[in-house]
């Protein structure tokens, strides 16, 4: 009799946990865009910087790191970065997505070319356009610029770095 009761309780707890998890999207995974494709050029006083390592660090719960080397014209690129995750569906998950593109120089933050923290509109045409045409001159001083979000003009992205922010044609 105790075995039947124990089995019934175990089945009840398992199915009620599954129903609860399904209701709140705990196991529902979907594609989440960490970064649109990145295309840029690295300059120093207007002259291309070749063979320089550029790093893209994307943080959304955990870190995703990509590295590339500039070509003879200073050009660099990163492919679109998608992950499968249940995080956006979780009711109490407030993690922001951090995009950080930098040159390594022995410091934790490196020489910051692009840095932004995104809490809404991670799949934004504004971000896609900006990341599609980065012109980063090492002679520029880093600055913070607020960019209006096309999809929600009442909001802005605060972007820090030394890249000229101009929108590529999509």
Image (cartoon, grey):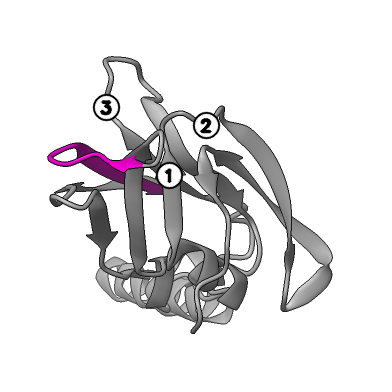
Asked whether disc 2 touches disc 1, contact meaning CB atoms under 8 Å apart, the reply is yes
In the depicted structure, whether residue 41 falls above or below residue 123: above
**Which residue, given by chain and number where applicable, does mark 2 sit on?**
140
Does residue 130 appear in the picture of this structure? yes
57 or 114: nearer the eye? Answer: 114
Q: Quadrant of residue 4?
A: bottom left
Quarter that holds the N terminus: bottom left
Looking at the rendering, the stretch of residues picked out in magenta corresponds to 47-61
Count of labels shown? 3
Tell me residue 103's x, y (percent): 30, 32
> Distance between the Cα atoms at labels 1 and 3?
15 Å
| 76 left or right of 17 in image | left
Labels 1 and 3: the sequence-earlier one: 3
Q: Position of residue 72 (x, y in %)?
A: 13, 50
In percent of width and height, residue 66 lies at: 22, 50
Q: Is residue 60 above or below residue 31?
A: above
Q: Is residue 162 above or below residue 131?
A: above
CA separation in Å, label 2 and label 3: 17 Å
Q: Nearer the viewer, mark 1 or mark 3?
A: 1
Mark 3 residue crowding within 10 angstroms, few (<14) / some (14–19) / many (20+): some
| Residue under pointer 3 | 104
The residue to which callout 1 is attached is: 136
- 122 in the magenta segment: no
Q: Earlier in the sequence, mark 2 or mark 3?
A: 3
Helix, strand or loop at label 1? It is: strand
Local SS, label 3:
loop
Residue 20 horizontal/vertical position (percent): 54, 75
* Residue 86, picture quadrant: bottom left
């Amino acid at each position: 009799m105790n075995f039947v009761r124990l089995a019934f309780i175990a089945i009840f707890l398992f199915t009620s946990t599954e129903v609860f998890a399904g209701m709140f999207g705990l196991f529902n995974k979907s594609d989440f865009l960490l970064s649109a494709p990145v295309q840029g050029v690295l300059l120093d006083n207007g002259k291309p910087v070749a063979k320089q390592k550029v790093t893209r660090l994307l943080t959304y719960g955990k870190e995703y790191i990509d590295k590339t080397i500039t070509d003879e014209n200073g050009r660099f690129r990163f492919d679109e970065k998608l992950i499968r995750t249940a995080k956006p569906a979780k009711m109490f998950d407030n993690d922001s997505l951090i995009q950080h593109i930098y040159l390594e120089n022995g410091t934790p933050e490196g020489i910051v070319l692009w840095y932004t923290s995104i809490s809404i509109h991670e799949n934004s045409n504004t971000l896609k356009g900006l990341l599609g045409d980065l012109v980063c001159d090492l002679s520029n001083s880093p600055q913070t610029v607020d960019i209006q979000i096309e999809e929600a003009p009442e909001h802005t992205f605060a972007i820090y770095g030394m890249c000229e922010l101009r929108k590529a044609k999509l």
